[in-house]
Image (cartoon, rainbow, N blue to C red):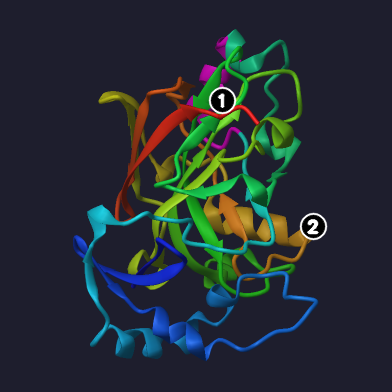
Amino acid sequence: MKLCRFNDNRLGLVEGDHVIDVTSALDALPAHKYPMPRNDQLIENLAMLRPKIEEASKSGPKLPLAGLALLSPVANPGKVVAAPVNYQAHYDEAEFDPEIRHGKDIVKIQTIGLFLKATSSIVGASHGVELVHLDRRNDHEIELVAIIGKPARNVKVENALDYVAGYCIGLDMTVRGAEERSMRKSIDTFTVLGPYMVTADEIGDPHDLNLALSVNGEPRQNNNTKNLLIKVRELIAWASIYYTLQPGDVFMTGTPDGVGPVVPGDTIDARIDKLGAMQVKVRAQKAG
C-alpha cells in the first residue's frame, strides 16, 4: 500500500500515476483531547485503518498524482532520528573534502552514535527546500527513511524490522559549518520526506534498494542500501536502547557518497527502488 498526504491534508492511496482520495477513512481515528498524543495517529492506527482505506478506495475520487501538492507522508512524528556517515564511500569522501569536514575530524558512526533533527524541519516534496545561509555551502543527501509503526524499546536486532510501518525517500539537507549536526540539519525545510509512504509489506528486506539523486539532470549520488555500514534493523535496535521509538517517528538511515552543493533555482531529483521518485525545488528563503 502506498499512502500520500496531499493538498489540504487529504489522505490518498497511490495507484500508478493516480491517487484515490480516501480521506473518509480517517473518520475512524480515535478522538483525543488535550494533551494530544506525542505520536502520529494515522501510523499508530494503520492496521485498523487499512480495510477502511481499501473500502474508501472503491468510491473515492481518482486524481492525477502529477497535479497534487504532496505533503510529508507523516504528519506528526515525535522525533527524527538520523545516522551520520553510514556508508563507507561517504565516510571516505568526507575525510578528504575540507568543505565537508570544515576543520573537524570525521568520526565513525560506531563511535559518534546517532543524532536527532527538529521535527519543524520536515516538509513534503512539493514544498521544496528553502536556503537561509546563502553565504555557506548547502548540500543534498539522499537517504532511505524508515517510519516506525509501534512503540520500540530495547528491541532485538532480529525483530527490529517488525517495528517499521513503511518507508519513504528522505533528503537530509545540511549547511556546512562548525556547528553540531543537529543544528545545521534542523533548519526549516531541511528534512524532505516523500513522495509517499510505502508500507513495509511491499518492501520486505530494505537492504537491497538502489538510491539515486541528480541536480538539474546531473547525476550526483548513486549507491545501494546493501552498503549501509549499520543496517536498518541494527539502527532501530541501537536507538531503542536509548529512547523509546514511537509510531510515526522518522528514522533517516544515512547518505551515500556524492553529496554536493545546491543553490536557489536548482531542481533535485531523488529516487529509490520501490519507493518512487520526487522532484524538489530549491529556493532562497524569503526575508521575514
Tell me which amino acid carries mark 1: Tyr
Q: Residue at x 72, y 41 (%)?
A: 113
Name the one closer to the observer, 7 or 92.
7
| Image position of 33 (left or right of 88) | right
> Which dot marks residue 213?
none
> Residues under labels 1 and 2: Cα distance?
24 Å
Q: Residue at x 62, y 36 (%)?
A: 84
Q: Is residue 27 magenta?
A: no
The N terminus appears in which quarter of the rendering? Answer: bottom left
How many numbered dots are placed on residues in this image? 2
Q: Is residue 86 magenta?
A: yes
Q: Is residue 96 above or below residue 12?
A: above
Q: Residue at x 28, y 83 (%)?
A: 57
Q: Which residue is mark 1?
A: 91
Q: Are marks 1 and 2 in contact (CB under 8 Å)?
A: no
| Image position of 94 (left or right of 214) | right
Q: Which residues are drawn in magenta?
A: 85-97
Name the one closer to the observer, 22 or 45.
22
* Residue 174 location (% of width, % of height): 59, 29
Q: Which residue is mark 2?
A: 242
Q: Is residue 85 above or below residue 74?
A: above
Single out the residue that lies furthest toward the front: 288
Tell me which amino acid carries mark 2: Tyr
Q: Is residue 108 above or below residue 9?
A: above
Q: What secondary structure is marked by label 2?
A: helix
* Residue 286 location (% of width, % of height): 56, 29
The C terminus appears in which quarter of the rendering? Answer: top right
| Image position of 64 (left or right of 162) | left
